[in-house]
Amino acid sequence: MLLIPCPWCGPRDEAEYTYGGQAHVPYPQDPASLPDEEWGRYLFHRANPKGPHAERWCHTAGCRRWFNAVRDTATNQLLAVYRAGEPRLAGGEANGRDLFA
Amino acid sequence: MADTETSVSARSPLAGHAARFAAATRRSGGAVRLAELPYLAQIDVRLDPKGPAADAVGLALGFPLPTQPNTVVHGGGSSALWLGPDEWLVVGRPGTRAELEGRLREAVGDEPAAVVDISAQRTALLVAGPRSRDLLSHGCALDLHPRSFGAGRCAQTLLARAQVVLAVRDELKPGFWVLVRSSFAGYLGDWLLDAATEYTGAV
Ligand SMILES: [Zn+2]
């Protein structure tokens, strides 16, 4: 089981969380005028990297906040977590916090 | 005309467990204490922690709302549990919910805030005694040792896969409040009695 550090609550079992897919996917500026192909791209196309991946998680059974995490998809290691609205992290930095303090 | 007023009496979610909780407590010889704390007043408060409503609620309660995640502040007959960066659960004695909700509503006034009576959503269990921590640890992944979960701490987490709010009781002796949704209370009560068998002897 993964130990995921909620930016509010600290490390908790994976079972307390819900996965929310890739983070930082911008909502189209003007959806009504978007061609179908680009709308489909917004809806369905996601990065599938081997390595650091910025993604959304919700601490469903805890504080119920959405936040972002950078997870290495090859090792399952959590590289960074940051609160919703905070700038995107590349991973490798702990955002000034010890992830598992 | 149908008489609808006199025949309704309140029945708490764990009323049917009271005798078994008492028997388990007795048999454990002081190791664990199990009991329901029914009908606590529970008010959900959502507001901007840096706004004027937070100060007003602090004044109305007699203590400031905790801003440190997963902490609880007790005082003046009520407690405020941190549930999120803009959300608290204010818990008061049975019978005070209308007064407490009114007092907090009045305090926030026209500020952007939500004050909602959710007393019926959850019931509370008292899990106390020197083995209470071991008992909860049978189904809870949190480190409940006082050095990481001591006085003033609370947490929303899973206990035996049921969502609960845990809070350390405001006393020197070990003990916890376990707030659980009414519809999960029977299941959790059964689970606690089962998990406590090792301290209470076979039923
Ligand atoms: Zn959390």
Image (cartoon, coloured by chain):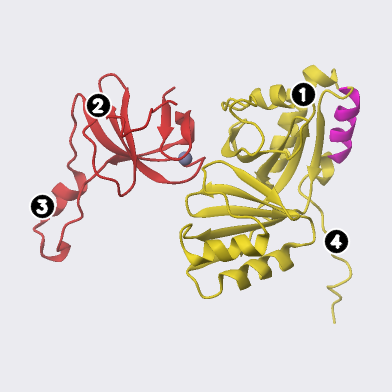
Chain colours: A red, B yellow
Query: Magenta span: helix, strand or loop, mainly?
Result: helix
| Numbered disc in front, either 4 or 2 | 2
Above or below, A88 relative to A51: below
Q: CA distance from mark 4 to mark 1?
A: 31 Å
The answer to whether the beta carbon of the residue marked 1 is less than 8 Å from any atom of ligand 1 is: no
Q: Chain of mark 3?
A: A
Among numbered discs 2 and 3, the one appearing first in the sequence: 3
Tell me which amino acid carries mark 2: Gly
**Image location (x, y in percent) of residue B8:** 84, 64
The answer to whether the beta carbon of the residue marked 2 is less than 8 Å from any atom of ligand 1 is: no
Residues tagged 3 and 4 counted as in contact (Cβ below 8 A): no
Tell me which amino acid carries mark 4: Ser
Task: Identify the element where label 2 is drawn.
Answer: loop
Tell me the magenta residue range: B18-28
Residue where numbered disc 2 is placed = A92
Say which residue appears at 32% left-offset and 22% top-offset. Answer: A77
Residue A87 relative to residue B200: left or right: left
The reply to whether the magenta stretch includes residue B182 is: no
Residue where numbered disc 4 is placed = B9
Tell me which amino acid carries mark 3: Glu
The N terminus of chain B is located in which quarter? bottom right
Q: CA distance from mark 2 to mark 3?
A: 32 Å
Residue where numbered disc 3 is placed = A38
The reply to whether the magenta stretch includes residue B19 is: yes
